[in-house]
Amino acid sequence: MASPTVAWAHPIVPNGLADEWLPRDAPATDSAFILRDREEPGELVWRDAAGDARGAVDVTQLRVHGNPDGIGLFVRFTAAPPACAMIQVAIDLDRASSSGALSFDRDTSTRIRADSRAEFIAVATASGGTVRDPSGRSVGTFGAAVGADGLEMFIPWTALGRASWPVGVRLSAAAFCASDGAQPDPVTSDALASRVHDALTDYGGPSTSVRHTRDEVSDGVIDKVFALYFVTSGTIPTALTIQRVAPMVDRARGGAWFELANRTSEALSLDGYAIGDEGIAGGPDGLFALPSGITVMPGASITVAEDGAAYRAVFGRAANVELGSTDPSTPDAVALTTRGRGAFSIDLAGDEVVLFDAERTLLDAFTFNGSSFGGTTPYPALSRNFALTRNPSGLDTDDCRIDFFAAGAPCATEAHCDDRQCSYCDRGLCADRADGLRCTAGTCPGQCSVGRCEPMCRSDAGDSSASSDAEGTADATVDGGTAARDDAGDAGDVAVTDVMDDMRRTDVTDVATTMDVTALQDVTDARRDALATDVDGALVSPPRTGCACRSAATGGSTRPVAAALAVLAAVSALRIRRENRGQRRSRPVD
């Protein structure tokens, strides 16, 4: 798996304009998505429901991006924000519940979730930004401005007491109205003590009833937290990615399975992470929480199987997790019935496989065929018993046509691979052997080309005696998964070149002027014997009974051989003509 250092960061200029940010949004309201593009800048976007605010400051979107100098945030509103608009962001750098502030800045009557106590509170208004420590003391400033698109801010890492980016950070955010630019005003729309106008939250989960910010702050706590990781360019990667995907596999071949890989630089606890085929909260398909206690080391991966028993029966080992409960020794994922109402069931016409972190941020999505799931471009064609793997470079651009490529059929043994001479089973997927390895295509010798044995000769249905002769001279030697490389093509090219050079140097003139081809025939006969010996007779000898030699698909190395044989045939014809002419001249006259 490639390192996530391929991601690139870009500068953020706090001017309230959206031109530095990706244009795409999260796929649904009250949801977060780690967005990427072809340059992989890495950006978290939260899509907040419109009309759920307790006052005039109604947020519809939060975006976060990091670079080597600091962290940038961009906030959109339903309309031009009032002059009193204030955004507070609680920043938890040590990601520990033992230190940091438990409340937002000043008198907000609103607490932060206990496991995300903040080392710093960033307070942004149209006139600028201030960083405060847990005691409320100002420890730094940063740029912030309101523009045509929203409120934008950029907080240097140095303002957070750091020389560079942290490995990870946890954020909580809320919108207030501060008439004096410092102290949030009380909210009079209801009897709650909290001064939050709009909380960036999913209200604790989807519900059939209409949800509102008042539902979130009724207990005085904002529970929504965004967990972000950074890589060496300072940008935001997808912490856990879908590395390999086999969503439509028959149970006789192990059932559907997925490989998830840790792209961060630290051990990653998967407590609360979820996978399934339902990306919209409350949708008709299934979403499953991974069992607790799973930790993935940097660069390592785990396998999630649809059916643990089917996977074990085929692969001879247990998956790390199963979405059902068919194998007692495989830990079961837990159906999140409030997030997805159905079971895991991939629709071949078009569907998605989605991966969420514990905070329900959508980390990764593989979509295919006619999927209409927002945020990604689908892989164009997917059939049954077909698997894909992420681009070797580790790309994560949200375009599945770029991020994934076809990896062939899922397999447990080489018997599951179409051409066992030229493909083999590698960690559950059929892989191609190196091009040019010798193999046998039917009854004729061949070479491996893109996982297939391409014949060097065609079988002649009219003569069944070809097989033993052809195979005896160019048999496939795939032994224990390793095949001998066929160097006959190179040898043939060299030998043919020698024949042609000899013809050009000495004998062609004789043929053209004196028609004395005896010397030429002697030379070419010798070269012909040597040529057949050099390449074991399989690729360049005259066609054997039952096989018609032709060019290999990988190299076309027999083309010069065919040309040499044509020259030899012409030389033989010239000799016969010369001998016939001499016989006519010496015949007695009656």
Image (cartoon, rainbow, N blue to C red):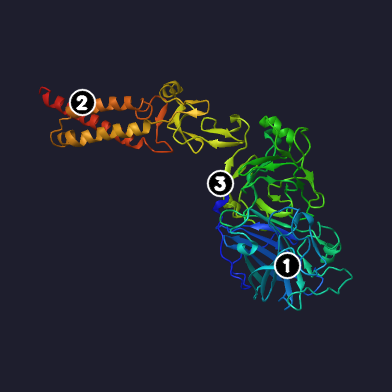
Instruction: Decide which of 89, 374 is in the foreground and name it.
Output: 89
Hey, what amino acid is under mark 2?
Answer: Asp
Of 109 and 572, the residue lying toward us = 109
Q: Of helix, strand and loop, which one carries label 3?
A: loop
Q: Residue at x 13, y 33 (%)?
A: 514
Residue 41 location, x and y as percent? 58, 59
Camera-near label (2 vs 1) is 1
Residue 261, position as x, y percentages in the image: 64, 44
Q: Which residue is mark 2?
A: 522
Residue 88, disc: 1
Is residue 526 depicted above or below 24 in this figure? above
Q: Residue at x 74, y 69 (%)?
A: 59
Return the mark for residue 2.
Answer: 3
**Residues at badges 3 and 2 in contact (C-beta under 8 Å)?**
no
Label 3 with label 1: CB-CB less than 8 Å: no
Q: Is residue 319 left or right of residue 207?
A: left
> Residue 543 falls in which quadrant of the image?
top left
Quarter of the figure that contains the C terminus: top left
Gap in Å between the C-alphas at discs 2 and 1?
95 Å
**Is tag 3's residue or tag 2's residue first in the polypeptide sequence?**
3
Residue at image position (72%, 75%) is: 79
Could one spot residue 472 in this view of the protein? yes
Q: Secondary structure at mark 2?
A: helix
The first of marks 2 and 1 along the sequence is 1
Placement of 78 over or under 512, stated as above or below: below
